[in-house]
């Protein structure tokens, strides 16, 4: 049997001399003997080969279909291709291939598919459970849980949908072989995963040491300094690689900066469009990196588990991740099949603020849960997420996160029927386990401190990571900056490049895309605004000078608004420069501004100075505020933001039709204030309205 498995391995890898890595055959053999395993091995060890080869051998012996549950279906294309080389027929059911579902479901019933790949979210789908799971449950040959650390809410990447896996597993006959795999689990997470998967799970654990990886940490608080360092050093690094950022905004900006400096780079994150034609944009970017058509992808965690490029030459972190486990998972993508690769961790002044945000928002707070359950309990027909938004001052993401969390509780206080959410019998008594959440948040903060300690560590960095991940084989690597006794790459950066980067950050103008649809449900009934926003009421595309509290002009805007009650003249110059670069057409001939009762002079004063600099008049009294309302930043979703403005503004009664204008505000978030004010100006006869904000509030991270 081992010889046949070796033949399959060589065919799958297309390598005539390939051999099993330590533990691979032993894991396959255990599955053939119908045992249950949790395999914890470093990235690149070949966990996918274990379940594909086991599937092939089990199918040869007459076993049923394998069921693989993974969050990484979009990143498993190369593994599936390897499976096909050994005759394993793999299929997947996901939102991008709905045209194939009927064929795949029939092939599953005909037993002509060897392995079905699904995401854990698919287990929540009623049609999938009825049309697929019920038919294959009785003859599953192998049950695989990929990235099994996602089961544990003690881990860095807990995903509520993974809770459904445990219920499916508990319902399966005990003689079905089970394989759970992960590369990132310390002892605490391993123990939790084993306890959830049930008795009889055997642990297979290998060394986490990556012999080719050369690690170095560089403390460099200023984003401009880090960008200067990247521009100088990335071209000299071997091969191609990944630069990780903590936010989508930074992924976009760093990628653009590298391109400006002649480095082939692209941004990769959750907001990169999917599918366009035959391939999604993410798939196109992955292929470019695999083929070395870009020097670097600047990515968020969206490019993480499952991406496999054996010859990746470097992984650089623009900011510090929130845990050693996550850092090891990401940096471990480099150097799998090359003699030398670099893992460079940079450190920024913004790191802790961003990671604290993620820690604080990992679980829905009890007050959100209570508010949602109360609204659902008040109706017999159930409510959609959009309907909940009209009743609750919660963000779309906050509502969805709370509902997902509640739906996988056991027993669950909510259930979904088509698009509507309903309460169950236990809803009235349900409470989040606050002590559990507090304990997990405490662990997250400990992990953050451990990551800070890693940043300051002067010994072997690889050994530090090994001990942090409870690797019993951890030892000095002999290759990192700690073992070397000094930096592998110079931590110095070019001052001229840093100055250019600072100017680039200040010129990171943000487009303000006009809204095209009024919120449904009568949010703006006083104005009679509903349905599509027609061309006669719509604003033109606008601009924001910067992002709120950003490294460019953002701090100056915040200081002017909250400390000085006056915006610096430098910001007038920045606006003039931006407008000249922007060159809106038809050219604005006057300036209007958003009125405020709290700071009545702040924006009009700036508008007057900007008008003088541009040589156009300022009509600061054209728009008037009729009454006080809540601050827009307190409104959490589109419906609430729009309703908060209903009837708040009016045009001066003597306003007459006029030429194009700039509509100025100090800060914008949702865009509804500028949208409503622009519509009033357009309805009053203004030819065109170009919104201009000093700062765009940073996009929320959820």
Image: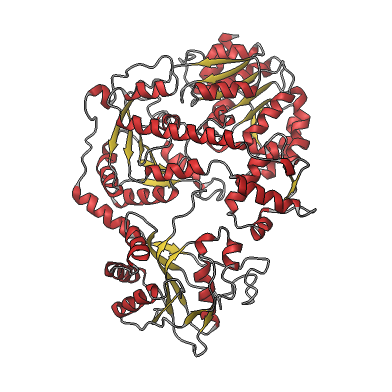
Residue 443 shows in the view: yes
Side of 639 relative to 507 (left or right): right
How far from the left and from the top, in percent, is residue 9?
Answer: 53, 18
In this rendering, the count of numbered labels is 0
**Viewer-nearest residue: 140 or 52:** 140
Answer left or right for 575 relative to 404.
left
Q: Position of residue 306 (x, y in %)?
A: 51, 32
Q: Who is closer to the viewer here, 72 or 638?
A: 638
- Please, is residue 261 above or below residue 218 in the view? below
Q: Please, is residue 95 above or below residue 107 in the view?
A: below
- Residue lying farthest to the right in this orientation: 380
Q: Residue at x 41, y 37 (%)?
A: 321
Query: Can residue 110 be seen here?
Result: no
Tell me if residue 630 comes above or below residue 108 in the rendering: below
Question: Which color scheme did the rendering employ for the protein?
Answer: secondary structure
Q: What is the x, y in percent for residue 120?
A: 64, 35
Left/right placement of residue 316 relative to residue 18 reads left
Looking at the rendering, in which quadrant would you find the N terminus? top right
Image spot of residue 468 (x, y percent): 41, 24
């Amino acid at each position: 049997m081992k010889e046949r498995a070796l033949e399959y391995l060589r065919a799958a890898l297309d390598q005539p001399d390939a051999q099993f890595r330590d533990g691979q055959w032993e894991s396959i053999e255990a599955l053939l003997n119908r045992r249950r395993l949790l395999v914890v091995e470093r990235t690149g060890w070949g966990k996918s080969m274990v379940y594909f080869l086991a599937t092939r051998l089990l199918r040869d012996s007459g076993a049923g279909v394998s069921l693989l549950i993974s969050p990484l279906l979009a990143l498993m294309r190369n593994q599936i291709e390897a499976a096909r080389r050994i005759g394993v027929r793999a299929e997947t059911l996901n939102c991008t291939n709905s045209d194939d579902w009927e064929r795949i479901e029939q092939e599953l019933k005909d037993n002509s598919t060897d392995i079905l790949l699904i995401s854990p979210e698919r287990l929540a789908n009623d049609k999938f459970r009825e049309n697929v799971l019920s038919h294959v449950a009785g003859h599953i040959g192998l049950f695989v849980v990929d990235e099994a650390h996602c089961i544990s809410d003690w881990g860095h990447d807990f995903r509520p949908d993974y809770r459904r896996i445990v219920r499916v597993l508990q319902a399966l006959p005990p003689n079905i072989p089970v394989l759970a795999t992960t590369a990132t689990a310390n002892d605490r997470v391993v123990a939790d995963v084993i306890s959830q998967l049930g008795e009889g799970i055997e642990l297979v654990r290998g060394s986490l040491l990556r012999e080719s990886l050369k690690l170095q940490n560089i403390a460099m608080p200023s984003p401009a300094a880090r960008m200067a360092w990247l521009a100088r050093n990335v071209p000299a690094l071997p091969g191609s690689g990944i630069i990780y950022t903590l936010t989508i905004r930074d992924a976009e900006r760093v990628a653009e900066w590298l391109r400006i400096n002649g480095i082939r780079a692209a941004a990769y994150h959750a907001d990169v469009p999917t599918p366009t034609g035959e391939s999604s944009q993410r798939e196109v970017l992955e292929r470019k990196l695999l083929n070395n058509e870009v020097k670097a992808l600047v990515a968020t965690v969206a490019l993480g588990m499952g991406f496999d490029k054996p010859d990746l030459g470097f992984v650089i972190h623009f900011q510090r991740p929130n845990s050693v486990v996550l850092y090891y998972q990401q940096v471990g993508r480099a150097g799998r099949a090359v003699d030398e690769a670099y893992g460079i961790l940079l450190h920024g002044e913004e790191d802790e603020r961003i990671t604290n945000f993620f820690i604080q928002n990992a679980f829905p707070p009890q007050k959100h849960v209570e508010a949602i359950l109360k609204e659902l309990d008040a109706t017999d027909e159930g409510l959609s997420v959009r309907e909940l938004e009209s009743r609750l001052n919660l963000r779309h993401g906050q509502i969805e996160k709370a509902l997902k969390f509640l739906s996988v509780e056991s027993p669950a206080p909510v259930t979904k029927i088509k698009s509507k959410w309903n309460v169950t019998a236990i809803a009235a008594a349900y409470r989040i386990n606050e002590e559990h959440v507090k304990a997990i948040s405490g662990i997250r903060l400990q992990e953050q401190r451990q990551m800070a300690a890693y940043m300051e560590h002067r010994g072997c960095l690889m050994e530090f990571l090994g001990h942090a991940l409870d690797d019993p084989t951890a030892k000095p690597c002999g290759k990192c900056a700690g073992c070397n006794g000094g930096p592998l790459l110079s931590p110095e950066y070019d001052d001229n490049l840093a100055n250019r980067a600072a100017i680039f950050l200040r010129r990171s103008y943000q487009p303000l895309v006009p809204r095209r649809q009024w919120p449904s449900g009568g949010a703006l009934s006083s104005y009679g605004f509903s349905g599509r926003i027609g061309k006669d009421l719509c604003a033109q595309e606008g601009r924001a000078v910067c992002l709120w509290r950003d490294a460019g002009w953002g701090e100056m805007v915040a200081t002017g608004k909250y400390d000085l009650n006056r915006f610096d003249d430098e910001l007038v110059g920045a606006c003039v420069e931006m407008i000249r670069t922007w060159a809106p057409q038809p050219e604005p001939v006057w300036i209007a501004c958003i009125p405020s009762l709290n700071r009545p002079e702040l924006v009009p004063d700036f508008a007057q100075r900007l008008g003088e600099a541009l040589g156009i008049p300022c009509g600061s009294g054209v728009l008037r505020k009729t009454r006080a309302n809540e601050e827009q930043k307190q409104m959490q979703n589109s419906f609430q933001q729009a309703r908060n403005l209903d009837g708040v503004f009016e045009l001066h009664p003597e306003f007459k039709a006029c030429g194009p204008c700039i509509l100025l505000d100090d800060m914008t978030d949702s865009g509804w204030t500028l949208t409503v004010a622009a519509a009033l100006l357009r309805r009053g006869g203004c030819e065109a309205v170009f919104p201009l904000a000093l700062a765009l509030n940073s996009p929320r991270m959820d």
